[in-house]
Amino acid sequence: MQKRTLTIQDLRSRIDSIDDTILDLLNERSQVVLEVGKLKSGNNLDFHVPGRERQIYERLLGNNPGPFPNDALKSIYREIISACLALESPMKVAFLGPKATFSHLATMQLFGLSAELVPMKSIPSVFEEVEKGRALYGVVPVENSTEGVVSHTLDMFVESDMKITAEIMLEVHHDLLSRTGRIEDVKKVYSHAQPIAQCRQWLDDNLSGVPTVDVASTAVAAQIASDDYTSAAIASELAASLYDLKVVRSRIEDQVNNFTRFLIISRKACDRSGNDKTSVLFSVKDEPGILCRMLEPFASRGINLSKIESRPFKKKAWEYIFFLDLFGHFTDPDVQAALDELKQCCQFLKILGSYPRSM
């Protein structure tokens, strides 16, 4: 008997059946999440555990046989987790706004669209929102792979008791946006200072002589461009859709691998995930050979340092504070011993937090 060839309608009916099954499973997952929420509430446990999220992603991405792509799988589960967390308890997250900035994109990348995302006007205001309990988490930029550290963020950690509970590595692409979408109409370019610096060569090659103007954020630049047909903004693709702008040129950043690192701050420390990073800040005594001595505790134990940055200590002229990132959790025996040894040559030392490394 000849086998019947499947029609498009047959295949669409099969897709509909699969979608119905996915819907049933999503609701079943949600019911289990609500049960977990009740247990957490009864035992006074944190409802959001960043390390648990990482375990879910790693397990699913490791078990994915394809052809469904891992990046898309992670994006889908980000929204599933976000929606399920919202069922357990509303989650408010403060970020350096306004909307459509790269901080906004980074916040959506980690927390999804079901969280309550609240834009703040400054980095200190993000810290304050979390410190006073008005937000569970805060998201702030800390460094760019092209332009270096965001000094305001590092300075805030000196006085603040906030803990770092996660990090996000966001690949940053800059678009030139305007109302007309025509490069010949551009008489002035607006953006934040960092994106302008990250696109300097492209601007020199393609808009030589056109003045650039620093503004508070890429979103502010997009708003200006939306009101002025002779202006353009360097901003994200999201800003184009929010402010009714057209893309004049896409991906105008000078460096292909352009990443910005964001830190997530909270009032509580993070438990060990098994693949952690620890951030500390400290000030050392001014003695001969002190720089070598402060690195020796880590070198002797084979602990990898991924970052070290110095900042002037504002309370004392010509003294410096060091910010250091290392691989491991502060409760790991080797890390604990290294920090104890480092502390002996420090005027002060503060552990900013141990948290899951960005995937």
Image (spheres, rainbow, N blue to C red):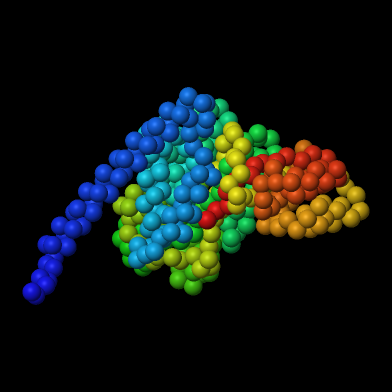
Q: Is residue 356 visible?
A: yes
Query: In the depicted view, which residue is nearer to us: 347 or 7?
Result: 7
Q: Residue furthest left?
A: 1
Which residue is depicted at the point 89% across and 55% down? 289
Up/down of 62 relative to 224, above or below: below
Q: Residue furthest right?
A: 288
Which residue is depicted at the point 23% across and 52% down? 19
Which residue is depicted at the point 48% across and 46% down? 53
Up/down of 93 relative to 14, above or below: above
Query: In the depicted view, which residue is nearer to us: 319 or 317?
Result: 319
Query: In the depicted view, which residue is nearer to us: 238 or 72?
Result: 72
Classify the position of the N terminus by image quarter: bottom left
Up/down of 199 relative to 119, above or below: below
- Residue 138's x, y, as percent? 53, 39
Image label count: 0
- Residue 342's x, y, as percent? 81, 47
Which residue is depicted at the point 67% across and 41% down? 352
* Side of 317 relative to 209 (left or right): right
- Residue 84's x, y, as percent? 38, 39
- Residue 317's x, y, as percent? 81, 43
- Residue 305 lies in quadrant: bottom right
